[in-house]
Amino acid sequence: MSIHQHVDELDGLPVFAFPPATAGTAALPEPGAVAWRLAVDPYDDSEEETFTELWQRFTETVELSGVRALVLGQWGEAYEESSSMVVDAVVAAKDRLTSLRAVFLGDLVMEEAEISWIQQSDVTPLLTAFPGLRSLSVRGSDGLAFPPVRHEALRELRFESGGLPAAVVRGICESDFPALESLTLWLGVPDYGGDYEVSDLAAVLAGARFPALRRLGLQNSAIQDEIATAVAAAPVVAGLETLDLSMGTLTDSGAEALLGGQPLTHLRRFDLDHHYLTDAMVQRVRQALEPSGVEVVADERGDEDVDDGTVWRYAAVTE
């Protein structure tokens, strides 16, 4: 699976692409009515504006005090240029972006750059600069850094990647986010930087680190069975409404551990899509949970390859 569509909504606001200089600004929406998308196309000869120039024009055109959400797309040749320039630009405007509540950093689709190519950076300055931020989403993990940080207001944290580095996973899980309600990690595979182990998730699985957490997604992993086994006994599950273990290589072994572990009947939604379960196991999961009102999502099965007797299973998003 590859990402082919740009983000179309952020923090409940429709995304509006800030127009190129040649388009004019007569029909711009109110600053707080949309999530502003800023991106350049370095391969379009007719568009000579750099991201720095685009950002400057945006800050001179739109009343920044009313801006609630930013979607930051291609800032150049994203497989060569780090997102640090974008992070620095947004942070530099913190005294004017007084209403900023949501940021999506790295809104690139496959036609612009594979997810594993996107050059990220330390994104925690966005949290430090904006104490009122409620939502932070990041796509891509090459060069990504996330040292442990505390933030009082953050409600949603999302990382989409083909491989999250172990240091990043630990930094996220060891941060202090007392208001965090939703955490989504596309953990990925070793070939694309995902050198984490289940032990790196220990702080979040223990349950006390994020007391308000209601949705947990530990997704897109090459070790989904090991994660499922850890989740089966993890204290964090008792407080969840949604548990998402989709997009990975989950087999009957992991599902068996989940069914034999702590009760899951309090969940509202249990997502296992893109799994490698047998039909009989899917039926067992449904029979165990659906009578209690749990929405079980397990319709999509991943594709297996068999080579000389070896079965190869794949996470949904890697390269």
Image (spheres, helix red, strand yellow):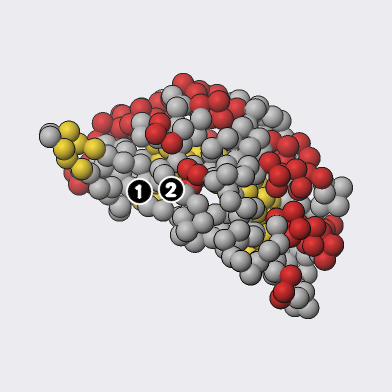
Viewer-proximal residue among 227 and 92: 92
Estimate how packed mark 1 is, as few (under 14), some (14 to 19) or many (20 or more) residues with alpha carbons within 10 Å: many
Image point 71% across, 30% down: which residue? 150
Element at label 1: loop
Viewer-proximal residue among 157 and 180: 157
Report x, y in % for residue 282.
25, 45
Residue 112 lies, with reference to residue 169, above or below; the image says below
Observer able to see residue 195 = yes
Report x, y in % for residue 5.
49, 61
Report x, y in % for residue 179.
67, 38
* Horizontal side of residue 232 vs 112, given as left or right: left
Residue 273 lies, with reference to residue 6, above or below; the image says above
Q: Quadrant of residue 234?
A: top left
Image point 56% across, 30% down: which residue? 168
Circle number at residue 269: 2
Estimate how packed mark 2 is, as few (under 14), some (14 to 19) or many (20 or more) residues with alpha carbons within 10 Å: many
Residue 289 lies, with reference to residue 13, above or below; the image says above
Amino acid type assigned to the residue bearing label 2 in the image: Arg
* Horizontal side of residue 260 vs 55, given as left or right: left
Image point 20% across, 43% down: which residue? 305
